Image: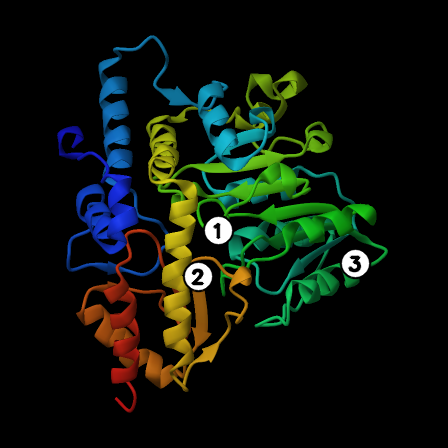
């Protein structure tokens, strides 16, 4: 596998012949066969060759016991890994814990906060099950009250979203838990404005950021949130099985660990205290670092630009089909690489059969979500909507 990893295409090619650059990047840096059009990056991303190689290489290193370290994580602090991730995400590594995914990170927050019966958790009606399930557990077990706020789809503007969430805060609201990018529609929420306004009201903010890193540019330390959960396996080229949890300084001592080993009482570990969970595979974390470096080799801004360019193309094509109810706003500041729309059930069923026959991997629901990334080809996007048009009346 290591021998099969080709050098990255020269960035000069991106300036002179951009489509040739992206074509070479897919063909040389990804294992995707030519026949596969993968349009579901929002559920699970595609690891490029250097990431797969890094995982394999560390598995071999660990099996040979050729290093001086245990080939694992779960007791170790993993400072170099956290420093690399924190530098990319824009926060201190001491505030960053490594987890297995965003769902686990969200559960760590929900189960670790001291909340009393009758305290209210406010969230949107568009939360992923991994982001809301842990709060519903607290509601069922400890008598907390979970209340949802309807998000307008599409919204008029970002100000409407701030007003809707902050205006719903009541006297018993202790926590506002919401997604930075909605998993259902790809709507980019005004996170900083919401968190800043919630803090004024004394409300803790928990951001499900599973779709954020790798899809849009941001720095965690500018969001003003108390907690943020992440899944780099979606948009940041990482393999499945690695996640992130950011904890604001003021919250480090207020959160109880969900899983414990001997070091759980050591407050000096800061966020690393929440990584003392027992033996886990370090190889996936090596893959996470390789994914970050892969994004940096292209240039994070170029990655975001390409993702968004393809999403704009998708939205424009969707707007031209009268049967589709667009949920993605006109304002392209409110979406990154996810475009969503509803389609009639009969049309969806006919389209889904055609897409499966052509090996096009799509998000399977009448609420369709097309998720583009750097491996997505423009012709994949075009063909997606050709199949929808060809499914009318089928």
Position of residue 317 in the picture relative to residue 58 (left or right): right
Note whether residue 118 is visible: no
Which residue is painted at 24% across and 48% down in the image?
21
What SS does tag 3 mark?
A: loop
Residue 83: x %, y % from top left: 50, 24
Q: Which residue is disc 3 drawn over?
A: 169
Q: Which residue is disc 1 drawn over?
A: 211
Note whether residue 110 is visible: yes
Position of residue 164 in the picture relative to residue 4 (left or right): right
Q: Which residue is disc 2 drawn over?
A: 338
> In front here: 313 or 172?
313
Which residue is painted at 41% across and 86% down in the image?
322
Residue 118: x %, y % from top left: 80, 53
Residue 101: x %, y % from top left: 46, 41
What SS does tag 2 mark?
A: strand
How packed mark 1 is, by other alpha carbons closer than 10 Å (few <14, some 14-19, many 20 or more), is many
Disc 2 vs disc 1: Cβ atoms closer than 8 Å? yes
**Residue 297, above or below 166:** above
Disc 3 vs disc 1: Cβ atoms closer than 8 Å? no
């Amino acid at each position: 596998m290591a021998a099969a990893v080709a050098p990255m295409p020269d960035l000069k090619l991106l300036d002179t012949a951009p489509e040739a650059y992206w074509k070479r990047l897919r063909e040389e840096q990804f294992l995707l066969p030519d026949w596969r059009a993968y349009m579901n990056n929002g559920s699970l991303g595609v690891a490029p060759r250097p990431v797969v190689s890094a995982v394999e290489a560390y598995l071999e290193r660990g099996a040979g016991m050729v290093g001086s370290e245990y080939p694992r994580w779960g007791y170790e602090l993993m400072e170099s890994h956290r420093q690399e991730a924190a530098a990319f995400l824009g926060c201190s590594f001491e505030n960053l814990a490594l987890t297995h995914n965003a769902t686990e990170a969200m559960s760590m927050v929900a189960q670790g906060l001291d909340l009393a019966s009758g305290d209210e958790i406010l969230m949107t009606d568009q939360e992923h099950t991994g982001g809301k399930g842990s709060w519903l557990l607290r509601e069922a077990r400890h008598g907390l009250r979970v209340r949802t706020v309807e998000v307008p789809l599409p919204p008029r503007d970002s100000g409407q979203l701030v007003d809707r969430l902050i205006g719903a805060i009541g006297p018993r609201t202790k926590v506002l838990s919401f997604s930075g990018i909605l998993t259902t529609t790809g709507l980019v929420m005004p996170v900083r404005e919401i968190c800043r306004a919630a803090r004024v009201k004394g409300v803790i903010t928990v951001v499900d950021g599973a779709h954020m890193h790798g899809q849009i540019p941001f720095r965690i330390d500018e969001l003003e949130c108390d907690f943020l959960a992440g899944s780099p396996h979606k948009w940041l080229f990482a393999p499945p099985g690695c996640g992130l949890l950011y904890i604001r300084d003021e919250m480090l001592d207020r959160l109880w660990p969900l899983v414990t080993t001997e070091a759980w009482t050591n407050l000096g570990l800061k966020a690393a205290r929440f990584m003392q969970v027992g033996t886990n595979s370090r190889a996936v974390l090596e893959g996470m670092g390789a994914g970050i470096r892969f994004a940096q080799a292209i240039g994070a801004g170029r990655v975001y630009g390409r993702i968004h360019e393809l999403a704009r193309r998708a939205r424009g094509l969707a707007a031209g089909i009268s049967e589709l109810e667009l949920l993605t706003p006109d304002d392209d500041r409110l979406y990154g690489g996810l475009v969503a729309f509803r389609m009639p059930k009969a049309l969806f069923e006919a389209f889904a059969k055609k897409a499966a026959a052509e090996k096009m991997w799509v998000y399977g629901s009448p609420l369709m979500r097309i998720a583009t990334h750097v491996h997505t080809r423009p012709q994949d996007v075009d063909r997606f909507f050709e199949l929808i048009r060809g499914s009318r009346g089928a």
